[in-house]
Image (cartoon, helix red, strand yellow):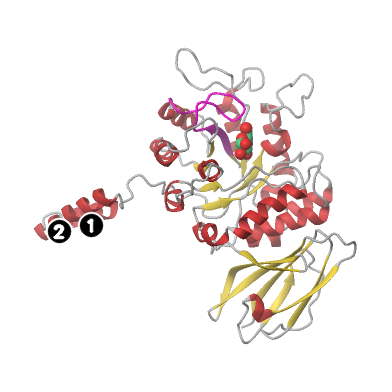
Amino acid sequence: MIDCCIFCQVYLLSMWCTTIYLSLTIICLQYNACNVNALENGLALKPPMGWMSWQRYRCIIDCDTYPYECISEWLFKNATDHIVANGYKEAGYEYVIIDDCWMEMERDPVTQELVPDRKRFPSGMKALADYVHSKGLKFGIYEDYGTHTCMGYPGVINHMELDAQTFGKWDVDYVKLDGCYADIMDMNKGYPEFGRLLNETGRPMVYSCSWPVYQEEKGLMPNYEALKKHCNLWRNWDDIQDSYESLNKITEYFAVNASRIQPNAGPGHWNDPDMLLIGNYGLTVDQSKSQMAIWAILAAPLLMSTDLKNIRPEFREILINQNVIDVNQDALGIQGSRLRVECKIETWVRPINPIINGAHSYAVAWASKRDDGSPCVYSSKLKDLGLTYDKGYEVTDLFDEDHDFDHIFRTNTNITVRVNPSGVQFYKFTPIQ
Ligand code: GLA
């Protein structure tokens, strides 16, 4: 529709064009095919990277007892400071995102605006956004499409325009819109509507939608074409919890449902398997590498949710591993998928840059789901991984730069990895010139 308009402005005087324009308009209206309400905010051309409070800090609101863990302006300023000071910003982490539990239970009785908790956010959200921006980072916030957020704070449903305007006024850069206490049948209309209202503020805000999770868990298949059009990212499935078991359930969902999920990812619109657990209580170092590698294959948003002031160095290193982040952020934006499972070794493959003589490079992760105590030796022929470039590939070990591969790997060459129980080996294959 918009394109038709520009076209017609140029040839405004031509009757021929006017006729075509009118016909196209009718077709557009009839089939709802023209995208006047689409997001088109030019954001999230790569999977968003940042820090989000929920996974680690949930809804801790007792700041008297837990001053360094409660959802408060201190927590987000502190996370901002650590992102800047400890190499995360340099590695690409950008958004500092407040999840649930930041509001007063009631809206302002006069203006009906959302009110940040007066005790925990005494300076207000605009001041917090200013602080985050002053450090060169971006500011995100959480709301819910329904009557209430999942933790019972006010939702946007009857105040959508006001809330979008409020977020614009506070200089928000990223909105996560959850879907508790909402009618799943309304979501196909309501989520796009809120996206449109965000756009109308004139402030570019990444729009993260939880719409598909709530529909799919009730047996309604999400409309991915609509999601791609209206949201920058969306939560496909269950909440991640702080355990390897939960991580595996999520990766299994993404593996099994890849054929309908994978094609929807691309620059500006991403599937979101949920936050990184790395640095918390539930994952070992090997399991953390495994999450980071699979999230890179899946072109997943990289949203840390951990205590950056106390994180152990080995976890920090995983979070800021530039080789792995580069795979995650690959500009082609093609989501990878699980190719096979054999002897409980999963092989995950993603086509990435550079493309040389027409042949893609590939990131390949071998993730072990074994628990038999010693590393498992596993071999695959390159051509069985889909790597068919006849001149062959050079190989880089993305977690171990000192790992020296002394020869070119051809399509018939066997690549042999030794994978720790619940660990991963993660390599990049680059076609030779
Ligand atoms: C839902 C979401 C989580 C988190 C909580 C907050 O469960 O899926 O990511 O935002 O709500 O209440």
Question: Which residue in the rendered view is the most extreme toward the left?
Answer: 15
Q: Amino acid at mark 1?
A: Phe
Residue 98 visible in the displayed image: no
Q: Which residues are magenta?
A: 139-158
User: Is 283 in front, or is 72?
Assistant: 283
Q: Nearer the viewer, residue 71 or 151?
A: 151
Q: Identify the residue under disc 1.
A: 7
Residue 201 in view, yes or no: yes
Magenta run includes residue 153: yes
Find ligand 1 in the image and state its quadrant. top right
User: Which residue does the numbered mark 2 point to in the structure image?
Assistant: 17
Say whether residue 143 is left or right of residue 302: left
In the image, is residue 221 above or below residue 415? above
* Disc 1 secondary structure class: helix
Is residue 344 rendered magenta in the image? no
Q: Residue drawn 66% across and 27% down?
A: 73
Q: In screen coordinates, is 198 left or right of 134?
A: left
Q: Which mark is residue 386?
A: none
Three-letter residue code for mark 2: Cys
Question: Badge 1: how crowded within 10 Å, few (<14), some, or many (20+)?
Answer: few
Left or right of residue 355, residue 296 in this image: right
* Residue at figure coordinates x 79%, y 82% from the top left: 406
